[in-house]
Amino acid sequence: MATRKSPAKPNVSADELLEYYREMLLIRRFEEKAGQLYGMGLIGGFCHLYIGQEAVVVGLEAAASEGDKRVTSYRDHGHMLACGMDPKGVMAELTGREGGYSRGKGGSMHMFSKEKHFYGGHGIVGAQVPIGAGLAFADKYLGNDRVTFAYFGDGAANQGQVYETYNMAQLWELPVIFVIENNQYAMGTSVARSTKSPALWKRGEAYGIAGQEVDGMDVLAVKEAGEKAVAHCRAGKGPYILEVKTYRYRGHSMSDPAKYRTREEVQKMREERDAIEHVRELLLSGGHASEDDLKAIDKEIKSVVNESAEFAKESPEPALDELYTDIYAAELPAGQEADA
Ligand SMILES: Cc1ncc(C[n+]2csc(CCOP(=O)(O)OP(=O)(O)O)c2C)c(N)n1
Ligand SMILES: [Mg+2]
């Protein structure tokens, strides 16, 4: 991965930098806590951690506006926190409790927030990509200027439905940003082993879709690229592809033998490319914060995360009756008769 190119004196305010630091740290500490709860048997099923990739969602959320939408894969906790969902509701869902966003019935991969325009959480690789185009279609149809962020991985980028979606999205000039989170692995398969043409963002060229690559370990670079993509979509120019080069520090999921890469490779990334450390250095070297200020933020974030875990543990399991709720829509769209 290329060395970082962002300027030593970035064109953002100290407050903005502090906010990105805080948001990235919240995701990291939250994920560490989720890993612990999983180890204690309090989280069942699948759990895919986002540690290492924090700058992707934080940078793109900084480029988004109120009302914009997002949809992603199963590696989704970071997206939820970055768009403002409550850590308590997310943690309670991870532990299958009533206080969770899906009342404990969805778990890690199936959470939604209408209020924050977060449309999941999808376990089927690539399935969220056409859904993202559908969300953008709705906005275009309604005539508003909303943009949808449809996130997917490097592995998902090899799926056929992605290219069917590219074609339709460009044909109908849909306001959707296809965000490829290229963390270099799809489970245990590296991009080099699965992909002949590694410039994933260029794969929109066949459809005439504009795009670019961006350093996903640099929140400022991600924000800048995100703003460009958003401006393109809001101007009615159709979809845009952002290939964000990132890296996951943990295993694919909580059960990953990790035989496909060396410890040294992961260690090198953590030491040389960490996105949180980068912002920390910018804050300190720019005189925007002292070590003590950052320690205070750390403490504050830890208590938010601990409170979310306490809330999750104290929240009851869903009542048996919940088995029968949220299966069919309670209301029919106007003009449709109920099927006897
Ligand atoms: C259609 C489908 N095929 C296979 C799987 C199993 N599977 C789950 S995650 C994954 C790898 C996807 O990798 P990538 O798109 O790079 O995302 P990442 O996990 O790196 O975030 C696979 C093959 C699945 N869930 N759905
Ligand atoms: Mg991947």
Image: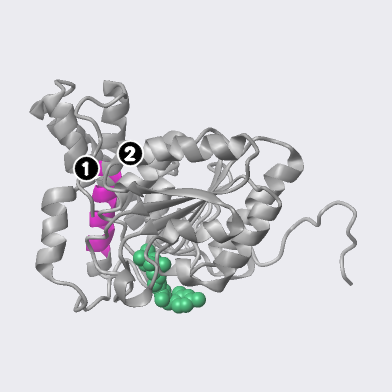
Q: Residue 83 lies in magenta, yes or no?
A: no
Q: Residue at coordinates 22% horizontally, 24% vertically from top-left? A: 9
Q: Residue at coordinates 72% horizontally, 60% vertically from top-left? A: 329
Q: Indicate the quadrant where residue 24 lies.
A: top left
Q: Nearer the viewer, residue 32 or 97?
A: 32
* SS for callout 2: helix
Q: Indicate the quadrant where residue 182 lies.
A: bottom left
Q: Percent position (x, y) of residue 165? A: 61, 62
The N terminus sits in image quarter: bottom left
Confirm or deny contact between disc 1 and disc 2 (CB under 8 A).
Answer: yes
Q: Main secondary structure of the magenta part?
A: helix
* Neighbourhood count class around disc 2 (C-alpha, 10 Å): few under 14, some 14–19, many 20 upward: many
Q: Percent position (x, y) of residue 77? A: 38, 54
- What is the number of the mark on residue 89? none
Q: Nearer the viewer, residue 209 or 59?
A: 209
Q: Percent position (x, y) of residue 221? A: 33, 39
Span of residues in magenta? 25-37
- Confirm whether residue 315 shows in the render: no
Residue type, mark 2 in image: Ala
1 or 2: tag closer to the N-terminus: 1
* SS for callout 1: loop
